[in-house]
Amino acid sequence: MSDPRPTAAPRPDAAPRPDAVDDRLLDLLAKQEIQEVLTRYLRAVDRGDVDGLRACYLPGATEDHGGVFEGPAEEYVASIAQSLTHPRAVTTHAMTNVLVEVDGTRARAESYVLAFARVRRPDGGVGDTLTSARMVDELGYSDGRWGIRHRALRWDWNHDMERSEGWVFGMLVERDRMKRSAKFPDDLVYADSLTGAGA
């Protein structure tokens, strides 16, 4: 008795050629390297690592920061370096959805970002602000590395609020015992060994 179930047609990619597999692996490696560039970028911003930030761009890169700045990336980095490295600057950039499309030595990435910042308000007070934005990047592979050729940042929404820092209503740990993040080069992420890194 014959089997009445329909037979699925063979998928054209069921047995990819070895060179096709190699191409897929190269794309995966490229996507991973690009994701690391984007992650290092945000870490450099939060840690005030100006040289690390510059290293995420390729030479001649441009920056369109959503109406805040538009021009050479080198000038953009220079324009924010002082605020990034200020010892009291507090920012946290969390990258969420990331989509990377690779085409040889070129790529495009769309990344959603949630950014928290503690800022000096126009009235002189201090406030907290939470902002959602997208980074749309054109990247290239040059001199053995992936980097940003052009970034276009677009704002989605923002919520401003009064400063509120109770550290779980005082239940976390005494403030003078807390081990806090730090700016470059003092943060523990830049230490040669985490053993004994008290920062």
Image (cartoon, helix red, strand yellow):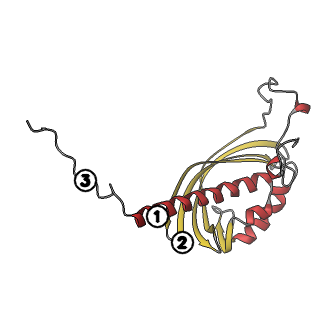
Q: Residue furthest right?
A: 176
Q: Residue 16's x, y, as percent?
A: 36, 60
Q: Position of residue 129 (x, y in %)?
A: 71, 44
Q: Residue at x 37, y 63 (%)?
A: 17
Q: Residue at x 68, y 68 (%)?
A: 57
- Is 169 above or below relative to 15? above
Q: Residues within 10 Å of mark 3 (few under 14, many from 20)?
A: few
Q: Amino acid at mark 3?
A: Pro
Q: Locate residue 111: give its quadrant.
A: bottom right
Task: Give the secondary structure at mark 2.
Answer: loop
Residue 3 visible within the image = yes
Q: Extreme front residue here? A: 1
Occupied quadrant, residue 73: bottom right
**Residue 199 shows in this picture:** no
On the image, numbered disc 2 is attached to which residue?
A: 105
Q: Which mark is on residue 22?
A: 1
Q: Amino acid at mark 2?
A: Thr
The three-letter code of the residue at mark 1 reads Asp
115 left or right of 118 in image: left
Mark earlier in primary sequence (2, 3): 3
Which SS class for mark 3? loop
Q: Which residue is mark 3?
A: 10
The image quadrant where one finds the C terminus is top right
Instruction: Indicate whether 11 appears above or below 2.
Output: below
Residue 69 at x, y = what percent?
A: 69, 66
> How much space separates mark 1 and mark 3, taking CA atoms?
22 Å
